[in-house]
Image (cartoon, grey):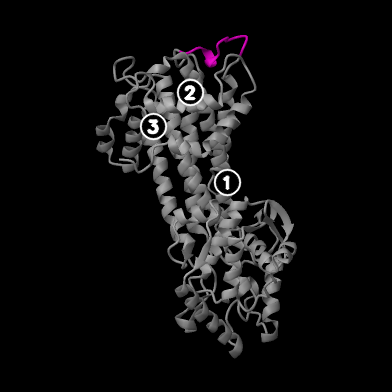
Amino acid sequence: MIELDGSHLTIKEFEKIVLLDESVKATDESWERVQESRRAVESVVENGQIVYGITTGFGKLSDVYIAREDVEDLQLNLIRSHACGVGAPFPEKVARGMLLLRANALLKGYSGVRQEVIERLLDLLNHQIHPVIPQQGSLGASGDLAPLAHLALVLIGEGEVIYKGERLDTNLVYDQLGWLPLRLSAKEGLALINGTQAMTSQGVINLLKAIRLARLSEVTAALTMEALEGVMTAFDEAVHVARGYQEQIDVARRMRAYLDRSELTTNQGEKRVQDAYSLRCIPQVHGASWQTIQYVKEKLTIEMNAATDNPLIFDGGAKIISGGNFHGQPIAFAMDFLKIGVAELANISERRIERLVNPQLNDLPPFLSRHPGVESGAMILQYTAASLVSENKTLAHPASVDSIPSSANQEDHVSMGTTGSRHCAQIIENVSRVLAIECFCALQALEFRDRKKLAPRTRAIYEAGRRLVEAVEHDRVFSHDIENIHQWFESEEWNSLLLPIDEE
């Protein structure tokens, strides 16, 4: 059971709760803050004060005063009218992450919702009931309005959920559990949908996958180094300390560890003086991608614990301020940066694939085929990798440089952070398959080397890979092999094969 207090949620805890279904509860101190801010909202309504989102309309309608008897209808209408997302739903784990992050933000005590609203979010998490939330429709400022409105529908017994593997109407699940829909009160609808939880939930899942891919990229590169009898001298610690980037130093150290005691790699001057950049510059390029990961991790950790709705309530209601914390620009930039950093792992991997299959660049059989000419071998595997990296170049175009006005020009600058986050998820899937192709080609190239000379760590990876994918004796449908390796990358078996990123 993990405790939430609105301020100390970590990436590791997010992973445990969202990906491993750990249960959650709120701290007593956070409930006290929630209750204090709720009393402030009730005072506003009772005294007829004009406060945005509590006793006024929204966006361009912020100058329209809402009478006390219409306050609840205002919140209900807000949720229904804003639930206009389109397209395929977010993955179930992203929706689960949105529940977690919205609850955590409300527990900060700046939002003015009742305790039962947050309790319902926590109940949904703990019962693994996940809203069906369309992916498209958010501008990433005024928060993720459309996606979060679909989440909020579930609290009032509307919309759809995934429960026990089935997509069901929310009211049917409530009936099964004996739950009653919530009736939202003043400010609660607005507090539920004003935030960055869609882009941030997808963003954290992107980050976790990007970390795994960055680690995998070092393994595939190590296999390729042995397949091509690469020059280890370029990974000497002195070279990387001389430049000073810690991430680069760390990648070089891990490459040396993967290839320790290899008799297939060479030293400077033995077979060649230096390798092509895609081999020689692995620490520099991969290290730079690790730098983007560290930047993104820092920003997401802040955002997971941020108050991102509007208005915010301070000092027990003495200050109720309408601001713009819902604007997703920090996460928009972070996702665009991560897109570029992860895409580069595939760019350099594809160049290594080319060196593995091109007979003009190595001493291996053409396209790693045992019968070149009558058979094409791995020729088209490089085509597929090239297609994926080219697609990534389009997806990596920064979403954050775009903006479009909305709400009759009241909301005249938006972040497009959710678009960036979604595109990042697509890039990650493509990168995984490019690395799968490199892994496949490196394994096949090693069929033409003395595998007794493999380093102990890479030998274990080779043997595990061969249990999954047979060596190529004749042409076959390689698509199945790529997907098998891609799925293998996501398995727990890899934890025993990968070096920890903090290993000394």
Question: Which mark is in front, 1 or 2?
Answer: 2
Quarter assignment of residue 235: top left
**Secondary-structure class at tag 3:** helix
Residue 417 percent across, percent down from the top left: 55, 55
Question: Is disc 3 in contact with disc 1, using a CB cutoff of under 8 Å?
Answer: no
Of residues 365 and 383, the one nearer the viewer is 365
Task: Count how many numbered circles sit on residues in the image.
Answer: 3
Q: Is residue 411 visible from the viewing direction of this image?
A: no
Say if the magenta span includes residue 365. Answer: yes
Q: CA distance from mark 3 to mark 2?
A: 16 Å
> Which mark sits nearer the N-terminus, 1 or 2?
1
> Which mark sits nearer the N-terminus, 3 or 2?
3
Q: Label 1: few (<14), some or many (≥20) within 10 Å?
A: many
Instruction: Identify the residue under disc 3.
Output: 282
Q: Main secondary structure of the magenta part?
A: loop
Residue displayed at 29% across by 16% down: 269
430 shown above or below 150: above
Say if the magenta span includes residue 39. Answer: no
Residue range corresponding to the magenta coloring = 364-375
Residue 478 percent across, percent down from the top left: 61, 24
Q: Label 2: few (<14), some or many (≥20) within 10 Å?
A: many
Q: Residue furthest bottom?
A: 47
Residue 130 percent across, percent down from the top left: 64, 58
* Amino acid type of the residue that numbered disc 3 sits on in the rendered structure: Ile
* Amino acid type of the residue that numbered disc 1 sits on in the rendered structure: His
Residue displayed at 67% across by 81% down: 71
Instruction: Identify the residue under disc 1.
Output: 423
Q: Which mark is residue 328?
A: none
Question: Is disc 1 in contact with disc 2, using a CB cutoff of under 8 Å?
Answer: no
For the C terminus, the quadrant is top left
* Amino acid type of the residue that numbered disc 2 sits on in the rendered structure: Ala
Q: Which mark is residue 442?
A: 2
